[in-house]
Amino acid sequence: VGALRELGVAGPTLGELLARAAEISLRQVNAYSFTAYRYMSDSDTVVVEHATRAGATPPRTRMAVSDLPSWLQRAVRGEFVVERAPQGGGTPVALMSLGWSPDAPIRSALAAPLSVNSRMFGVMVVTSPQIDAFTEDAAILFEAVALATATFAENARLVENARITLEQVNEQRKQLSALNNSVQTLNASLNLDATLQSLAEQASLMTTAQMCSVFLREE
């Protein structure tokens, strides 16, 4: 419960949530490395969104899901995976993103999907060079942290979408108001110069242009 409360006070962005999830996982699950991947369903690829290995964060890396070890591919497809003796290959780049090195090969791993309402958008993974390093309680805690991270991230996404939608609605209202003012100007003024000046001002407001000119064609 305390770990989930810690996660709840993290920032609203996915990066901030994953950074806090990494801190909790490394401390309470007793992991050697933490890696979080963002999943792109359109290309069936993953990007290393956050990674911590022995205190260092490797650069962002993009790879095909097929490059990952087979047990991690299962997590990308939505399965919570407990690997006490990870097998199944994986490219060198994929293994490095998981914290693998000749001095610290992966001998235990937990992988939890990040998904909400069947929308899969990532995977969290912790690994250890020790055999059978993660207890059942550690696995339960890690799965709960992943679920909470996904829920908080989805809520943040919905709030951001609502904010963008509200801004778009307000902008449309401004444009409609400017259009209405233009129509009223045409109907109310008999002064050509004043009418053209008002039309230019209203067009500038509607298009956010810095300058607007009106040209008259002589017949």
Image (cartoon, grey):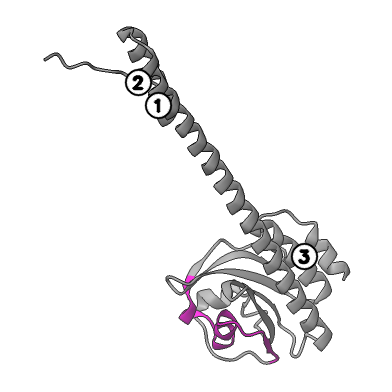
Q: Give the residue at mark 2.
A: 212
- The quarter of the displayed image where residue 75 is located: bottom right
Residue 23: numbered disc:
3
SS at mark 2 in the image: loop
Query: Disc 2, disc 1: CB below 8 Å?
Result: yes
Q: Name which residue lies at 58% across and 83% down.
A: 72
| Residue closest to the eye, 102 or 70 | 70
- Mark positioned earlier in the residue sequence (3 or 1): 3
* Vertical side of 54 occupied by 108: above or below: below
Say which label, 3 or 2, has the lower sequence index. Answer: 3
Tally the numbered discs: 3
Where on the picture, by quarter, is residue 158? Answer: bottom right
Alpha carbon distance from label 3 to label 1? 47 Å
Position of 27 relative to 185 (above/below): below
x then y, percent, for residue 23:
77, 65
- Magenta span contains residue 158: no
Distance, label 2 to label 1, CA atoms, is 7 Å
Provide the residue designation for mark 1.
209
Residue furthest front in the image: 187
State whether residue 56 appears in this view: no
Name the element at disc 1. loop
Q: Residue 33: x and y, percent? A: 70, 73
- The kind of residue tagged 3 is Glu
Left or right: 134 with respect to 125? Answer: right
Whole-number angstrom distance, CA of label 3 to CA of label 2: 54 Å
Q: Which residues are magenta?
A: 63-84
Q: Position of residue 41 (x, y in %)?
A: 47, 72
